[in-house]
Image (cartoon, rainbow, N blue to C red):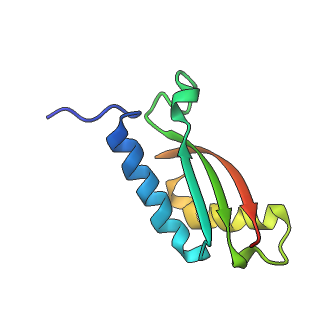
Amino acid sequence: MTQPSPLSPDVSAERTALLRDRLVILQPTDLEIEDQSHLHAGHAGSRGGASHFRLRITSPRFDGLSRVARQRLVYDALQDLIPFPIHALVLETQVP
């Protein structure tokens, strides 16, 4: 049986679902996840099948935190997924 391509819809959907599951801990009131791996084809990180994502997340857990502190919370929730299967994230973090 052949494995799906790293950029296949199946892999993208699985990784998007994994990100959603991991980010539940931040109690997001709004969460948008966009797979941007196709924009990074040929990039060193994507050659091994790792993905690039853009996240827009709004959470009350970010209240009173700096932009860097909010991003640290996101990275803490995803730490075991980086650098594989997630190679890179573009983060937009907001307070409701």
**Position in image of residue 15 (x %, y %):** 43, 51
At 70% from the left edge and 52% from the top edge, which residue is drawn?
Answer: 91
**Position in image of residue 4 (x %, y %):** 28, 35
At 50% from the left edge and 55% from the top edge, which residue is drawn?
Answer: 81
Front in this rendered view, residue 68 or 93: 93
Asked if residue 38 is positioned above or below residue 22 in the image, the reply reads above
Asked if residue 33 is positioned above or below residue 4 in the image, the reply reads below
Q: Is residue 84 visible?
A: no
Q: Determine whether, in the image, residue 91 is placed left or right of residue 8.
A: right
Front in this rendered view, residue 14 or 75: 14
Q: Is residue 25 visible?
A: yes
**Position in image of residue 11 (x %, y %):** 36, 43
Which quadrant: the N terminus? top left
Total labels drawn: 0
**Position in image of residue 69 (x %, y %):** 79, 67
Q: Residue furthest left?
A: 1
At 55% from the left edge and 33% from the top edge, which residue is drawn?
Answer: 45
Which quadrant: the C terminus? bottom right
Q: Quadrant of residue 64?
A: bottom right
At 65% from the left edge and 62% from the top edge, which residue is drawn?
Answer: 57
Q: Determine whether, in the image, residue 14 is placed left or right of residue 88.
A: left
Q: Quadrant of residue 10?
A: top left
Q: Determine whether, in the image, residue 68 is placed left or right of residue 80.
A: right
